[in-house]
Image (tube, grey):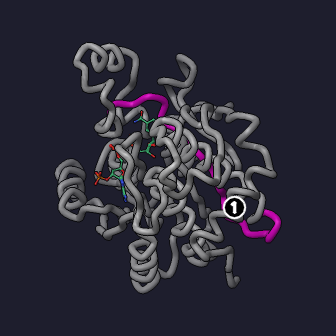
Amino acid sequence: MTNWNVEDITSQKGKNIIITGANSGIGFEAANILAKKEAHIIMACRDLSRAKEAKQAIISEFASASIALYELDLSSLDSVNSFVKQIKQDYKSIDILLNNAGVMAPPYTQTKEGLELQFGVNHIGHFSLTLQLLDLFVTSTDPRIVNVASLAHKFGRIKVESFYYRPSNRYKKNIAYAQSKLANLLFTYALDRKLKSLNLNIKVLAAHPGISSTNLGRHSKVLSFRGIRKLVNAFNQSSYMGSLPSVRACTDLDAKSGEYYGPSRLFEVKGDPIVVSSTKRSHNQELQDLLWDESVRITNKKIDVSI
Ligand SMILES: NC(=O)c1ccc[n+]([C@@H]2O[C@H](COP(=O)([O-])OP(=O)(O)OC[C@H]3O[C@@H](n4cnc5c(N)ncnc54)[C@H](OP(=O)(O)O)[C@@H]3O)[C@@H](O)[C@H]2O)c1
């Protein structure tokens, strides 16, 4: 394993990088680092005023940052479609898609299509987005798709009946989060397999930030207790450190398709970004295919790339 650090990232000038959820936490830090490496950053955010503030924060540190703001609400497939339409009008080529946006353990909410929110935003929205953008990667010299997963995938199971709300379902929000994060990895490995079989030279990778200090825990009752928050903060890492596995997956010239990056220390809770492994379940091809088929059915999107 070669050493890697931010200083060694080569210039990203000329690259167009889409980052979902780029206004906060891990996505913001990744946007900040990659903008300073001269990439053109497309911040795909659900709230343009928050995106504007984030852009200003980056520009105040690096005046020549190249940043465009686009509205994207991953809880609505119509919003994903409009975003894709706009991007295809404005760009001929995309180099990197960092599927970072996420929501954790909210009260029960449905997406516009009636899906459980975490499954809808964390997986289905990104599934539709990725498949529709594939065309734009083929002219890039080092195209990459990076999905942000979580240590929580280890507790995930795929239960098709829980994708949509049923009055009989007892909603377990943490289990639903774990399912959505397992889905991120199943999607990564399935897409990698499918693109390789089509001889499409697009790297598909995953990353996780360990436990990082961001806004993700906003819905957590446990974290609302000051004592517990203090305890968690004593072990976790900064959002900057948490962004490094994603940034490494996006930029390391030695990174290979199908790799998963995460922190090196304390059972992957914190530390420098290295290649880590995910559960046996995430590599189960039958489960990958089940999720893929359901995702195609829900989104009505499939791989359709004209070279
Ligand atoms: N922090 C951790 O310890 C940790 C651990 C494991 C995995 N992760 C993963 O890291 C990723 C980033 O999370 P974070 O920790 O940086 O949390 P964060 O600070 O809350 O950022 C999440 C981002 O996702 C955006 N988002 C939420 N719902 C969306 C929607 N419907 N459409 C579009 N964007 C939406 C948020 O937008 P708003 O600002 O408008 O809400 C925000 O920009 C997530 O995938 C998360 O699962 C984080």
Q: Quadrant of residue 157?
A: top right
**Magenta span has 75?**
no
Say which amino acid is labelled 1.
Trp
Task: Give coordinates of residue 132: x percent, y percent.
Answer: 56, 75
Quarter that holds the N terminus: top right
Under circle 1, the secondary element is helix
Residue at image point 53% right, 29% down: 263
Residue at image point 55% right, 25% down: 268
Q: Which residues are magenta?
A: 196-214
**Magenta span has 201?**
yes
User: Where does label 1 land, which residue?
Assistant: 292
Task: Give coordinates of residue 246: x percent, y percent.
Answer: 50, 44
Within-10-Å neighbours for mark 1: few <14, some 14–19, many 20+: some
Q: Give the total number of marks visible in the rendering.
A: 1
Task: Give coordinates of residue 216: x percent, y percent.
Answer: 35, 39
Q: Residue furthest front?
A: 168
Of 116 and 275, the residue lying toward us: 116
Of 162 and 28, the residue lying toward us: 162
Residue at image point 74% right, 65% down: 195
Of 75 and 255, the residue lying toward us: 75
Does residue 87 lie above or below 100 as drawn?
A: below
